[in-house]
Image (tube, helix red, strand yellow):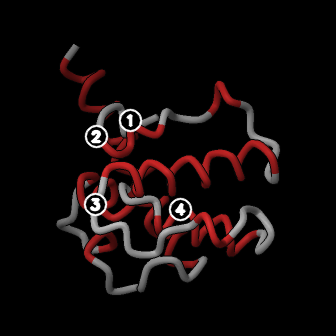
Amino acid sequence: MATVTATSNTMVAELWRECAAWLTRCNIIPNDHRANHLDSDIKVLATILRDGVLLCNLANFFDPSSFDRKDFNRKPQMAHFLCIQNIKLFLEACKTNFGLKEADLFEPTMLYDLTNFHR
């Protein structure tokens, strides 16, 4: 059982590191960001995504018309309502503009509360 857990943890670590590298290639986070450091962990990536700003920047990177920019708050300062609003904008863009299914997405509170981040 311990081997399965270790393998699962390794796979999750590889996935979030690839995610951080991909965000870097898309110019969403800088190459020298902490999320790209070898000693970094998944919480670093989760924390920088939890206000929804980088996610909205990512949606805008792929499709500048993916959401109404007036609804996007660039500096939510971790205000729950504003962060959730940004995350919802991103998720709606994922469904409407990028064809993802609701079942493949997470709930906004999962990211904000940093629960089930692996999803």
* Number of the label disc, if any, that sits on residue 118: none
List x then y, in percent, for residue 111.
38, 43
Q: Amino acid at mark 1?
A: Met
Residue 81 point in image, percent of width and height: 38, 50
User: Callout 3: 10 Å neighbours few (<14), some, many (20+)?
Assistant: few
Mark 1, residue position: 110
The reply to whether discs 1 and 2 touch (Cβ–Cβ < 8 Å) is yes
Residue 55 circle label: 4
Task: Give the label, 4 or 3, closer to the camera.
Answer: 3
Residue in view at x 49 percent, y 33 percent: 107
Q: Earlier in the sequence, mark 4 or mark 1?
A: 4
Marks 4 and 1 sit apart, C-alpha to C-alpha, by: 14 Å
Residue topped by disc 2: 113
Task: Choose the circle earlier in sequence order: 4 or 2.
Answer: 4
Q: Residue at x 75, y 42 (%)?
A: 95
**Mark 1 or mark 3: whose residue is earlier in sequence:** 3
Task: Find out whether the residues at labels 4 and 1 contact each other: C-beta distance under 8 Å.
Answer: no
**Circle 2: residue type:** Asp
Q: Mark 1: few, some, or many residues within 10 Å (few <14, many ≥20)? A: some
Q: Which residue is mark 3?
A: 78
Give the structural element (helix, strand or loop) at label 3.
loop
Look at label 3 and name its amino acid. Met
